[in-house]
Amino acid sequence: MSSLRLFVAVLPPDSALRELRRAVAPLHALPGADRLRWTGTDGWHFTLAFLGNVGEELLPELHARLARAAHRTDPFTLRVHGAGRFGGRALWAGAAGAIDTLRLLAERADAAARRSGVPMDEHRRYSAHLTLARSRGTDADLRPFVEALAGFEGTPWEVGEVALVRSDLPGGGAPGERPRYEVHASWPLGR
């Protein structure tokens, strides 16, 4: 049996991605920006649960459980908001709005995966973030980037679906290669 590398996510609409892209563009000119691997806008998403490699035999049950989780969660409002960092490893944009609902949806996605037989990492408190850049190997000083983006306030949008996304890691070893993302399935929120 083959497997797919999957995660469950909320995908911002194109309008939110355009706003964020305009806000992030000046960061590429800051000192040290060339030492970061910048995530392309096609990779901008709020991961709810990272599933890793999932055997195809688990997909029917996983789809049914994720559909149920989406059905039990009403649509909610979110916006991209501010920035932060995970040490010197990753720069991210945050979220604001109905964060409690986003967190609940993340918990439901995690539970759906576990109950479908997907071996999940240790459960930890959900932290809503959209990864913008990662350091190349060694830790980087990301504070100037966080400060430059700290005041960013995106326009609110309604989250109306949850997506199961396939992630294909680069295999060629070419500089600048990025993972490729493809929506494998999605389900509308609410009844």
Image (tube, rainbow, N blue to C red):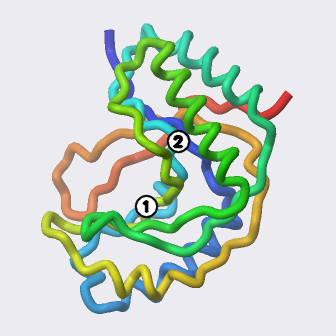
Contact, CB < 8 Å: mark 2 with mark 1?
Answer: no
Residue at position x 28%, y 57% from top?
Answer: 177
Q: How crowded is mark 2: few (under 14 residues within 10 Å), some or many (20 or more)?
A: many
In this rendering, is residue 96 above or below 167? below
Residue 72 position within the rendered picture, expressed as x and y whole percent measured from the top left: 75, 27
189 displayed left or right of 3: right
Occupied quadrant, residue 75 = top right
Q: Is mark 1 on a helix, strand or loop?
A: strand
Residue matched to label 2: 48
Residue at position x 40%, y 34% from top?
Answer: 123
Q: Residues within 10 Å of mark 1 (few under 14, many from 20)?
A: many
Marks 2/1: CA–CA distance: 13 Å
46 displayed left or right of 38: right
Farthest-out residue, left: 138
Residue 112 position within the rendered picture, expressed as x and y whole percent measured from the top left: 55, 21
Q: What element carries label 2?
A: strand
Residue matched to label 1: 131
Residue at position x 42%, y 80% from top?
Answer: 146
Residue 84 position within the rendered picture, expressed as x and y whole percent measured from the top left: 44, 71
Q: How many marks?
A: 2
Residue at position x 40%, y 63% from top?
Answer: 39
Q: Which of 49 and 27 is in front in this view?
A: 49
Q: Judge depth for marks 2 and 1 and give the one in front.
A: 2
In this rendering, is residue 144 above or below 42? below
Amino acid type at mark 2: Leu
In this rendering, is residue 153 above or below 188? below
Farthest-out residue, right: 191
Amino acid type at mark 1: Thr
Q: Quadrant of the C terminus?
A: top right
The mark nearer the N terminus, 2 or 1, is 2
